Image: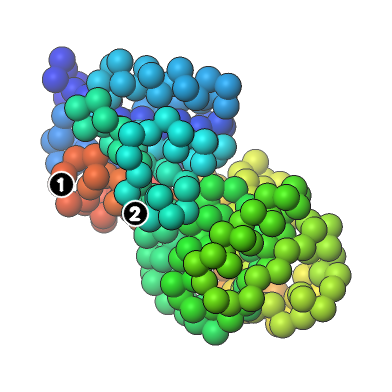
Amino acid sequence: MIDAQTRLLALLGHPVSHSLSPSFQNAALQFLGLPFVYLAFDVLPQNLSKAVEAIKTLNARGFNVTVPHKERICSFLDHLEEEAQIVQAVNTVVNEDGRLLGYNTDIYGFEKSMEEEGVRIEGKNVLLLGAGGVSRAIVFALGRKNITSLIIANRTLERAQELALFAERFFSFPVKVASWEDAMEGEGECFHGVDVIVNATSLGIKGEAIPLDWHKFLSCSLVMDVVYRKGSETGFVVEARKRGIHGFSGKSMLLYQGVRSFELFTGHPAPVEIMKKFLEEG
């Protein structure tokens, strides 16, 4: 029941109309009878600082952050926990009496999604598509899994180079940077022997295809997509499965980053099965 004691939890991003977070977060809150409501707000990049001030003014308990704010949000926070400090990307913010504390639960979500799917990436050669905030969390998770090598491809080469420097700072595996066009066409020796492809771009949210030349990636045996879609798999995962490649979308990652966020917001263990049920139902 919503009353005068109910506190706000929020999702800030652009776009957010596709998000399933309100569905499974509110289901969990209602299941436990907790005095919170979770709402999504479409916030343009130029309005992020105003949105953060509004959160503080309204004394909201906290908020999740999604594309394209995960890196820029750091400059508006009072403290970053250890992993968020390392990756310089935040997707969960908790309001502790006016102090905004930043966390990165994407790392946990990505690692847990691999565990759920029963996949192992130790010793694998990985191609990562994208170099935004979620990519930093993924690189950190990949590094902890002891992959053999990493290729980063992004439309903006400078962003890929920055992410490569981050990876090299913390991990010893070789890192290469490739143009988006070369990655799509599989042009270059560095793409020979790619075992795993991870899509960390926003391509696919609206049903867009990733124009990958699959014939150049015959060694690929696993595809992981950070993107998810209501009621269906992403085109990237569908194309992978057509070719007998194990593929899965970002729903599981969304669930488990949300589980960790829920616990940070409320201080209660998350009802995972309830959250999973409502996430699947969309």
Query: Which numbered tag is attached to residue 173?
Result: none
- Residue corresponding to mark 1: 268
Element at label 2: helix
Quadrant for the N terminus in the image:
top left
Res 251 visible: no
Element at label 1: loop
Residue for point 77% across, 63% down: 178
Residue for point 19% across, 40% down: 266
- Residue corresponding to mark 2: 82
88 and 124: which is toward the camera? 88
Q: Residue furthest front?
A: 169
> Which numbered disc, 2 or 1, marks the residue closer to the eye?
2
Horizontal side of 279 relative to 9 (left or right) equals right
Q: Position of residue 100 (x, y in %)?
A: 31, 33
58 and 15: which is toward the camera? 58
Tell me which amino acid carries mark 2.
Answer: Glu
Vertical order, 175 against 133 (above or below): below
Q: Position of residue 119 (x, y in %)?
A: 47, 77
Cα–Cα gap, marks 2 and 1: 22 Å
Quadrant for the C terminus in the image:
top left
Tell me which amino acid carries mark 1.
Answer: His
Vertical order, 274 against 186 (above or below): above
Looking at the rendering, which quadrant does residue 151 occupy?
bottom right
Looking at the rendering, which quadrant does residue 144 occupy?
bottom left
Mark 2, Cα crowd under 10 Å, few <14 / some 14-19 / many 20+, is: few
